[in-house]
Amino acid sequence: MKLLTNYKYWIVNLIGWVVFALLMLTIDKISYSGDTPINYVNYLLVEGVLCGLLGFVLSFIILFYIENYFDIGNYTKADVYKLIGVVIVTQVLYHILLWPILNIPIEYYMGRSVNLTLFQKLTNVPHFLAYFVVWLFVVLTLKLVHHINTIKVKQLQLEANLKEAQLNTLKGQINPHFMFNSLNNIRGLMLEDVDKARGMLTNLSETLRYSLTKSDVNSISLEDELEMVENYVEISKIQFENRLQFETEIDSNSLSKQIPPMIIQMLVENALKHGISNLKSGGKVKLLTIIKDNQLQIEVANSGTLQKSENTTHLGLQNIKKRLELLYGKEATFKLKEIENEVVATIKMPLV
């Protein structure tokens, strides 16, 4: 924040100096005998304005030093001493110029010149010094508050950039992981059935289109996600043949709700890779969505058991957990557990 170029600051600063000078003179002015009230009031007003204007002009010197040579966020003792030196120099200039300037209203309204002794003049030094110190405190406080706010804004920007980078990194991990499995399926199938391979390529192209068009967003409708999941399951059915049964139970009210892209696909992929593929006779995968307790609940259950010896925090599940945490914080949860010979993955997230 540059106060030197802020016109609002200069207006407030000018008013502040003049008001201070008028108050100080009203409280502490030495009365002159024989002066008429009207002359005294006029003199007092002019003197106050002149004192205020002088302080206003000289405060520019201090402010110029602060804005160009004093870093409020990274200053040294030497910088503080230099600032004190600038204030002292400004005070000397103030009192050198003050009395010749004040001769003008005194001679005009009172018909006399300033005839105070040096000691009487020096008694005014603490008053003006105190105001300069108060003014300096206000300016430094404004600069400090602005510096703190700037740091907070930068921290928020860094956190937002980090969050975006983390999300983009996770998306970058998801797409190659899915593509690798799909291309392997196609390569194996092309040696057995070209027509089926062609059908898989069609489904894969739709999935690719979805991945490319949705990779730059953090949320999509559940309905769009389900369409992509259907394509993925069709690809997988060719691989698993009759070993895979896929069922859905979708709450119609949940179709318009927003979810992170490809998150259901990853749940289904995890169910196939770590569940159905390990069963010789295959099994069933069931997808359930429901709105409950003002939350969207997504559940994917697959036949099989949760292998205790297996590292269940593999890449897919880690991505799901991290993405939910980055997008929703503590408002979203992800759980993986075994219930009656089924592995159930459950996501709960706020309604969006």
Image: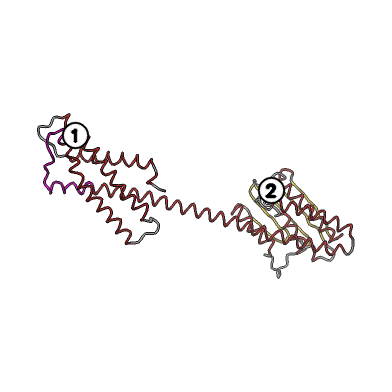
Q: Position of residue 151 (x, y in %)?
A: 46, 54
Residue drawn where x is 82% and y is 60% of the image: 283
Q: Does the CB distance between marks 2 and 1 fall below 8 Å?
A: no
Residue drawn where x is 56% and y is 54% of the image: 160
Which residue bears the numbered disc 2? 220
Comes first in the chain, label 2 or label 1: 1
Please tell me which residue lies in front, 145 or 308: 145
Q: Position of residue 125 (x, y in %)?
A: 20, 48
Residue 111 lies in the magenta-colored region = yes
Q: Is residue 187 above or below residue 106?
A: below
Residue drawn where x is 68% and y is 61% of the image: 173
Specify the segment rendered in magenta.
107-128
Circle number at residue 43: 1
Identify the amino acid type marked 1: Tyr
Q: Position of residue 88 (x, y in %)?
A: 25, 53
SS under mark 1: helix
Closer to viewer: mark 2 or mark 1:
1
Q: Is residue 106 above or below residue 225?
A: above
